[in-house]
Image (cartoon, rainbow, N blue to C red):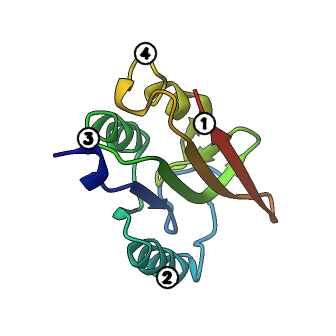
Amino acid sequence: MSMQQRKNRAVIIVNYAFCSRTEPLQPRKGAKREADKLFKALSKLNYAVKLYYDQAAKDIEEIYRQESREEHGDCFVSILSSHGEEGAIYDCWGELVKLTRIFQILSPQRCPVLAGKPKIFFIQNLCRYLERLCIFLLAI
């Protein structure tokens, strides 16, 4: 497949229902509906989009490991939406996943196919009743 034919790729991970935590995390009503809209919008922009709901930490990391082995177009977009803390999101079991871990999986050393290409991360992080949207642009 030539470079012109490769599609830009996007991953959307939304955790909206949470289990097994001493301090229960509230369900994120409306998160699934928002994710469906994002999926449709990126698809209309001709992205190859994968949408995942309620993922465990090991599964989140595996999703990004799989992406690191895929053919990519000019850029990669990731949307992570969950409860979280500074620099981390909660998986569906209430365990923290550090964002730096995800960024490392897509580093040039581990993901040469995306080396030098923009990797755009939208992080919607609900942190103790304060909603934050962080956008990271990595061009490493």
Q: In the rendered image, which residue does mark 2 sit on?
A: 37
Q: Which amino acid does label 2 sit on?
A: Lys
At mark 3, the secondary structure is loop
Query: If you read the primary sequence from the N terminus, does the residue marked by circle 1 or circle 4 appear first?
Result: 1
Which mark identifies residue 109?
A: 4
Q: Residue at x 42, y 33 (%)?
A: 114
Q: Nearer the viewer, mark 4 or mark 2?
A: 4
Camera-side mark, 1 or 2: 2
Query: Could you tell me if the residues under marks 4 and 2 are in contact, i.e. CB atoms within 8 Å?
Result: no
Q: In this view, does 9 lie above or below 45?
A: above
Per the model, the C-alpha gap separating discs 4 and 3 is 15 Å
Among numbered discs 4 and 3, the one appearing first in the sequence: 3
Q: Which of marks 1 and 2 is nearer the N terminus?
A: 2
Q: Name the residue under label 1.
A: 99
Mark in the foreground, 1 or 4:
4
**Residue 70 disc label:** 3
Query: Please, what secondary structure does the residue beneath circle 1 have?
Result: helix
Q: Check disc 1 and give the amino acid type.
A: Leu
* Marks 4 and 3 in Cβ contact (< 8 Å): no
Mark 1 and mark 3: Cα distance apart in space: 21 Å
